Image (spheres, helix red, strand yellow):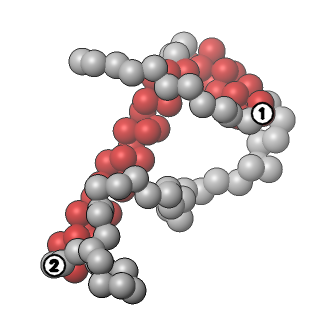
Amino acid sequence: MNYKLMNFNIPVHLKERLDYIATYKHISRTAILNLLVDRYCQTEMISIENERSGQGTLPVRNNHTPIDLDLPLAPKFTNWDYDPFLLEEL
């Protein structure tokens, strides 16, 4: 399997929680993040396929130009139960 290094910023409180959980469960942060990204991608791919099969054609913009669905879109977190103030302290 090929790998690619990704660097990104993360809020300090989330990194601290991630470190705590990784240490407690004896699993790497990378493994946790890969699992979460994989689950998110699977869910979104199902959603995309459902949207595509329901429409039958590519969606169009106001100027009648088809939208390229292969371009990355902003993530939607509608199905995620996320409360940044929940479990504020470890």
Task: Residue at 29% x, 63% y: name it.
Answer: 68
Up/down of 50 relative to 64, above or below: above
Tell me the distance, in whole angstroms, between the alpha carbons under discs 1 and 2.
Answer: 44 Å
Give the numbered dot on residue 80.
Answer: none
- Residue drawn at x 29%, y 77% is 65
Please name whichever residue, 57 or 68, is drawn nearer the observer in this view of the structure.
Answer: 68
Q: Nearer the viewer, residue 53 or 27?
A: 53
Amino acid type assigned to the residue bearing label 2 in the image? Gly
Reply above or below: 17 against 48: above
Q: Amino acid at mark 1?
A: His
Dot 1: element: helix
Mark 1 lies on residue: 13
Q: Residue at x 59, y 20 (%)?
A: 22
Location of the C terminus (image quadrant): top right
- The image shows residue 3 at horizontal and vertical percentages of 34, 19
Judge the density around disc 1: few (<14), some (14-19), many (≥20) Cα neighbours within 10 Å. few
Number of callouts in the render?
Answer: 2
Give SS at disc 2. loop
Check disc 2: other Cα within 10 Å, few if <14, some if 14-19, many if 20+: few
Please tell me whether mark 1 or mark 2 is closer to you in this view: 2
Please give the name of the residue rendered at 22% of the width and 80% of the height, measured from the top-left corner. Answer: 55
Whether residue 12 is situated above or below residue 37 in the rendered picture: above
The image quarter in which residue 62 lies: bottom left
Residue sitting nearer the eye, 12 or 39: 12
Whether label 1 touches label 2, CB < 8 Å = no
Q: Is residue 32 visible?
A: no
* Residue 47, image x, y percentages: 32, 63
Name the residue tied to disc 2. Answer: 56
**Where residue 16 sits in the image (x, y, percent)?**
74, 26
Closer to the N terminus: mark 1 or mark 2? 1
